[in-house]
Image (cartoon, rainbow, N blue to C red):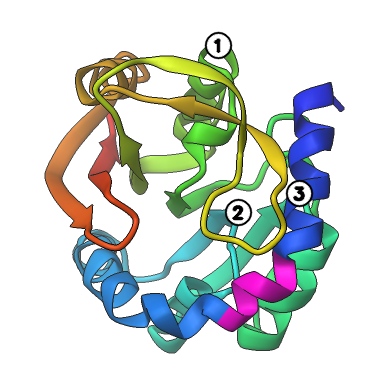
């Protein structure tokens, strides 16, 4: 496991309970974000096997289970998995690094990756997008959403808005930069939307994608 992954693993292990405590704060916005993704999936497939990469506190997994989806989640943080299991007990959980884990012959109709891509250096983030594409079935639907910035940079920075002042690796993406890499990974953009978190002063980009 790469060093930056180990550092991020430690940070999210330390913050898992706080993520659980903050979960209700994001319920409304998470429903708004997942609704188009769910609609695209249901219009395209009759049966949906869905993978979430980095499930956080498990809120979205629970939404997907409510729709009758078969759900799997993968996370590098063991403690985050413990929290997510409480919220989404029907899901299968994999404790592993997404880039290193071998899914074998398994393919998914949908892959959900919210606030994930910024946890990888650009070179590895490109590999993440390529692996998402590979793991999707033909015409499969993916969601990639993250905060965006005016300047592209990466490195170790303190995790904001949490009581423990821990540094983890993050990549700040510019919108055009991320869209370019998504298209290079052979995705069709079905829908692009933006959001702004007034409390945290963050701009968000949400991409609803289809494998081509």
Other residues around mark 3 within 10 Å, as few (<14) / some (14–19) / many (≥20): many
Query: Of the numbered discs in the image, which one, if any, rests on residue 11?
Result: 3
Q: Where 206 falls versus 44 (above or below)?
A: above
Q: Name the residue under label 2.
A: 54
Q: How far apart are marks 2 and 1 (CA)?
A: 19 Å
Q: Where 26 falls versus 10 (above or below)?
A: below
Q: Where 67 falls versus 198 (above or below)?
A: below
Residue nearer the viewer, 192 or 162:
162
The answer to if 210 sits in the magenta stretch is no
Give the position of the N terminus as an image quadrant. top right
Q: How many labels does the image show?
A: 3
Residue nearer the viewer, 68 or 158:
158
Q: At numbered mark 2, what does the secondary structure look like: helix, strand or loop?
A: loop
Q: At numbered mark 3, what does the secondary structure look like: helix, strand or loop?
A: helix
Residue nearer the viewer, 151 or 3:
151
Q: How far apart are marks 2 and 3 (CA)?
A: 13 Å
Q: At numbered mark 1, what does the secondary structure look like: helix, strand or loop?
A: helix
Q: Earlier in the sequence, mark 2 or mark 3?
A: 3
x and y, in percent, of residue 93 in the image: 74, 65
Quadrant of the image occupied by residue 200: bottom left
Which residue is found at the position 72% from the left and 62% from the top?
A: 15
Dominant secondary structure of the magenta stretch? Answer: helix
Give the position of the C terminus as an image quadrant. top left
x and y, in percent, of residue 32 in the image: 22, 72
Q: Which of marks 2 and 1 is nearer the N terminus?
A: 2
The span picked out in magenta is 16-21
């Amino acid at each position: 496991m790469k060093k930056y992954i180990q550092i991020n693993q430690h940070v999210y292990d330390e913050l898992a309970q706080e993520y659980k405590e903050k979960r209700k704060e994001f319920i409304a916005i998470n429903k708004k974000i997942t609704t188009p993704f769910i609609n695209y999936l249901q219009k395209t497939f009759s049966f949906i096997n869905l993978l979430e990469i980095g499930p956080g506190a498990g809120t979205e997994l629970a939404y997907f289970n409510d729709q009758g989806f078969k759900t799997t989640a993968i996370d590098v943080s063991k403690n985050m998995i413990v929290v997510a299991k409480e919220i989404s007990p029907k899901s299968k959980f994999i404790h592993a690094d997404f880039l290193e884990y071998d899914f074998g012959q398994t393919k998914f109709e949908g892959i959900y990756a919210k606030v994930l891509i910024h946890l990888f250096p650009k070179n590895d983030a490109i590999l993440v997008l390529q692996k998402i594409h590979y793991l999707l079935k033909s015409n499969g639907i993916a969601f990639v959403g993250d905060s965006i910035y005016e300047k592209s940079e990466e490195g170790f920075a303190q995790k904001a808005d949490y009581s423990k002042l821990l540094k983890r690796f993050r990549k700040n993406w510019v919108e055009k930069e991320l869209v370019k890499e998504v298209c290079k990974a052979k995705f069709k953009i079905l829908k692009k939307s933006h959001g702004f978190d007034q409390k945290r002063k963050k701009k968000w980009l949400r991409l609803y994608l289809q494998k081509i």
